[in-house]
Structures are given as structure tokens and as C-alpha cells.
Amino acid sequence: MSQVKISVEEAREMIFPIDTNIIREEMTRLIGKPNCAAFVRELLTRVSENAAPDNTLVAEGDVLKIFDLVLTQNGVIRAGAPGSLPFSPQFPTGNCATGSIATNNAGIQIGNIIPGAPVTHDELAALYRRGDGRVGMHETLHHAGRLVYSDQEFAIAVSTMPGMPALPGGHNKFAFSQYWDRELRNSFR
């Protein structure tokens, strides 16, 4: 491939197709890391213990089995951009979990990647491969609850884990999402 740089504006318009095999491979790689596996286990244990009685843990918290369940329901689509204004009434942001396992319409929406600087086509493709798997992990964890676990529930659970930073103030769902996602991504190291 060419080493010609694509501007941020051009990259924003380039939409790479969803590849669920690559997403699953990246999730498998991440959950195979001991720190990530331990974090996810503890997170799901804490959330499921405090969830509403009808919002039970799906597939005993096996992230890959949950992802496979999502694929049999509404699957994974690409739309919007992370942190964007509402993309449409049906899909409110770039990255989100839609529906639920309980209602047989669980889905994951992954937004476009907007690089912070010009990139080559190969670099942009690598950003998508890595990013889609990480977003896929985050959104799949929401579907670990039969009726979906919320960002607030995850943030509260993370805040009770030893050594975690304080929970963000207020009731901003994006702040809750960023809070627990930061700790999830720290577990990928």
C-alpha cells in the first residue's frame, strides 16, 4: 500500500466494513490476558450481584459466548462516530449496545474512527482492527446483563474495586462510560 497520508477529514469519510471475525479475534486476544480476564470477571461479578433480579448474568459472563449471542440477534453494525451528536433516533451515538439478550434483539453499533492526525491507509486499517475489538469488548459487556448492564452500574462496580479512582460526580452517562472504559482498557496491558 502507498505511504501517502490521508487527511483527518478524508479518513473521517472512509468507512471500513465491520469484520466480526477480526473483532472476535481481538476480543479473544484481550480476554486471554490475565489482567483483563481478572478485571472482567470481577466487574461482572460485582455488577451481577447488585443488578435487578431479572437482569441476570448471561452465559455465566463468558464474553465470547455473549458476543456470539449478539451475532445471532441483531449483530454488529457500523454507524456514527464516537462522541458524535445523535446519528439517528434509532442509533444515538457512534458506539452503543442496542436492544437486549432478553428481548432477542441485542446489537452492537461501532462508530467510525477519526484519527487525531493524518494516517496512511494501512495505519487507518490497523486502527479499525484494534479499535473495533476494544469497542466490541466494551459493548459486549453491556449485553452480559440479560436486560443490559448500564454504564452507571459498571462505573459503580469499578469504583468499589481496590485501588480504583473515585467515581465521577453527577449522573452523566458519558462520564460513567469513560470512567469504567478507562479501567477496562488499562486491563488490556
Image: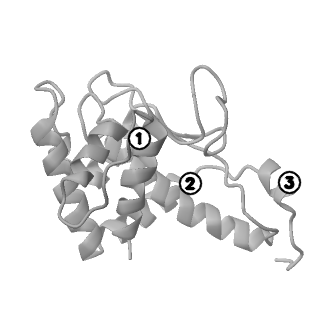
Looking at the image, residue 61 sits to the left or right of residue 133; the answer is left
Query: Which quarter of the image is occupied by the N terminus?
Result: bottom right
Q: Are marks 3 and 1 in contact (CB under 8 Å)?
A: no
Question: Is residue 189 positioned above or below 110 on the image?
Answer: below
Given residues 25 and 161, the one toward you in this image is 161
Label annotation for residue 19: 2
The residue identified by callout 3 is 9
Amino acid found under the numbered disc labelled 1: Leu
Q: Of label 2 and label 1, which has the lower sequence position? A: 2
Q: Mark 1 falls on what kind of element?
A: helix
Q: Residues within 10 Å of mark 3 (few under 14, many from 20)?
A: few
Q: Of label 3 and label 1, which has the lower sequence position? A: 3
Question: Is residue 49 positioned above or below 23 on the image?
Answer: above
Cα–Cα gap, marks 3 and 1 = 31 Å
| Residue plotted at (26% across, 73% down) | 35
| Residue plotted at (46% across, 59% down) | 134
Q: Position of residue 60 (x, y in %)?
A: 14, 47
Cα–Cα gap, marks 2 and 1 = 12 Å
- Examine the rendering and report whether any part of residue 62 can be seen: no
Q: Position of residue 128 (x, y in %)?
A: 62, 61
Given residues 59 and 10, the one toward you in this image is 10
Query: Which quarter of the image is occupied by the C terminus?
Result: bottom left
Amino acid found under the numbered disc labelled 2: Asp
- Examine the rendering and report whether any part of residue 138 can be seen: yes
Residue 70, picture quadrant: top left
Question: Is residue 152 positioned above or below 113 on the image?
Answer: above
Q: Nearer the viewer, mark 2 or mark 3?
A: 3
Q: Residues within 10 Å of mark 2 (few under 14, many from 20)?
A: some
